[in-house]
Amino acid sequence: MTALEDAQSVYKRIVELLRLDGQEAAAHGVAARLPEASLVQAREVAGQQGVQAAQNLLRDAGVTGPAAAALAETLAHPVMSGSLVALKRGERAWDVAGVGVLEGANGLWRLRVYSQVQENWVEATACGAEDVCQAVRQAMNRVLAEPLPEA
């Protein structure tokens, strides 16, 4: 373990760990929303049967054209995935903020998990490293006493 000096140092270390260094979006202007179980299944299918099989599964889950193609490509050729969960104990409950990252050979996705009708869903948004860094900053600022200084 390494003690970090302050919140800015923590932010910089998270950016390093997530390997955010100028990567482009996996596709421009595409996003997908699907049940988490479908995304997990598509990841497994991509690894075993390839891009086309994963793309078909994503389409069956309601992901449309360009988003299904780009996400299937990412799932078939993964480079890195990771997440940040930031917690702050309130008087009655925990404040929780987070962001997920998925990188494929074709670029980056920002992931957000949410519940819909008692089922976990994932919103996957193709975006560049700068946007993911901003999402990390927002998650941290939600739980910090003082916000991080602007980059």
Image: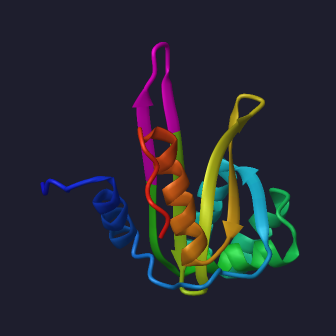
Horizontal side of residue 149 vs 76, given as left or right: left
| Depth check, front residue: 105 or 43 | 105
* Displayed quadrant of residue 53: bottom right
How far across and down, in percent of the image, does residue 93 sit? 49, 19
Is 86 covered by the magenta stretch? yes
- The image shows a total of numbered marks equal to 0
Q: Is residue 21 above or below residue 16?
A: below
In this picture, which residue range is highlighted in magenta?
Answer: 84-96
- Who's the residue at 37% across and 60% down the image? 11
> Residue 128 in the image: x percent, y percent?
61, 78
Q: Name the residue at the top extreme.
A: 92
Magenta-drawn stretch, dominant element (helix, strand or loop)? strand
Q: Quadrant of the N terminus?
A: bottom left
Considering only vertical position in the picture, is 58 above or below 52?
above
Classify 10 as above or below 93: below
Q: Is residue 57 left or right of residue 7?
A: right
133 left or right of 69 in image: left
Q: Could you tell me which residue is drawn at 30 percent across and 65 percent down?
A: 13
Asked whether 85 falls inside the magenta stretch, the response is yes
Name the residue rendered at 51%, 30% in the picture: 95
Nearest the eye: 104 or 148: 148
Residue 117, x across and y down, in percent: 78, 30
Whether residue 97 is situated above or below residue 66 in the rendered picture: above
Frontmost residue, 137 versus 80: 137
* Colour mode of the rendering: rainbow
Residue at image point 54% right, 86% down: 105
Please state the horizontal and vertical placement of residue 31, each as a whole percent of the image. Answer: 77, 66
